[in-house]
Image: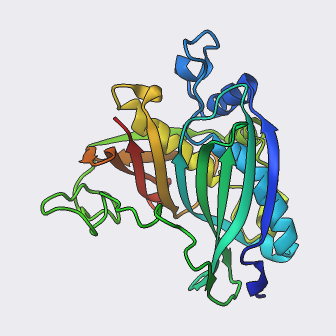
Amino acid sequence: MKISSGILGAAAGPRIQDIDARWLMAYAGALGQTAPDYLDTTRAGGLLAHPLFPVCYEWPLAVDLRSKTLTDEIALRGVHATHDLTIHRRPRAGDRLSTTAAITSVEPRPPGAYVVTRFETLDADGRPVTTTDYGSLYLGVACERHSHPDPLPERERESNPLSPVGRGKGEGHGGEGHGGEGRPPAWSADVPIPASLAHVYTECARIWNPIHTDRAVALAAGLPDIILHGTATLALAVSEALRREPEGAAAAVARVRCRFGGMVRLPSTLRVEGWKPAESGAGRAIAFRALGADDRPAVRDGWLQLTT
């Protein structure tokens, strides 16, 4: 099986979607979040969207683009490999958002074809709300290397303050891939993953992929069983990091980046670990990761950027 180079530049959208309080609350509720910022409709300034909520309105574009560019056989081999979300402002109840998606990179990796899709979301006034670079790995699928001349302008060239590149002497902060390997985390938390979570998340996020809820489909795809969505795993990890911030859920999240590793089975327990925040020119950066029941990283190289 091989992915054609012709998919580079393929686009979907714009798709217009209305954001309401019910959707915002359902997403937070699926994650077990009880902070009034997510659930209290009398909150001054209105409800806050969970930082990972953008995956909800991006998903229909992902489905549209996949149906235009991949066969069902190849699509079934896709796993979420990387996620890089920039939040220009949090979406709000009452927003009418316009989202587009485009494939910006296709390149071979040892496990298969790595495809990056960029999602751009604007509000009704044409102002940016979120930008996401979503990396998918199609296991056992071949491809040729193709990428846009500058697929990630400025945004990808920004220095990650937690990476070895651009880090000042003595500023390692722990966490896999952040230049501080071997340093113990500053905190850890065990998060129970009930057997029903994938089903609840599917309906509340409005993200339906049968490998997360249909055991027959998961087994046919070569998985050991249904597994939790990568976005749900990342959202749970981000929630634990925010729980330790003075502002809690209201902390000003500007960016979330990570790579995905092992699968999270249901039921199980997810262990989230985080390191002491690092000051950067843009605010505070927190390194984190999440380990599955087998102690393998389900989320690695996690990086949460907060503005001050």
The answer to whether residue 13 is left or right of residue 145 is: right
Q: Position of residue 41 (x, y in %)?
A: 64, 13
Q: Nearer the viewer, residue 75 or 21?
A: 21
Q: Position of residue 78 (x, y in %)?
A: 71, 69
Q: Identify the residue at image location x=61%, y=45%.
A: 128
* Residue 116, quarter of the rendered image: bottom right
Q: Identify the residue at image location x=24%, y=52%.
A: 184
Color style of the picture: rainbow
Q: Is residue 212 among the parts visible in the rendering? A: no
How many discs appear?
Answer: 0
* Residue 284, quarter of the rendered image: top left
Going by the picture, which residue comes out furthest to the front? Answer: 125
Query: Which quarter of the figure is the C terminus placed in?
Result: top left
Going by the picture, which residue comes out furthest to the top? Answer: 42
Q: Nearer the viewer, residue 63 or 238?
A: 63
Q: Is residue 279 among the parts visible in the rendering? A: yes
Q: Identify the residue at image location x=79%, y=71%.
A: 75
Going by the picture, which residue comes out furthest to the left? Answer: 170
Q: Position of residue 58 (x, y in %)?
A: 72, 50
Q: Nearer the viewer, residue 108 or 155?
A: 155
The answer to whether residue 136 is left or right of residue 182 is: right
- Residue 270 vertical position relative to residue 94 in the rendered view, above or below: below
Q: Identify the residue at image location x=22%, y=57%.
A: 183
Q: Position of residue 282 (x, y in %)?
A: 33, 46
Query: Which quarter of the figure is the N terminus placed in?
Result: bottom right
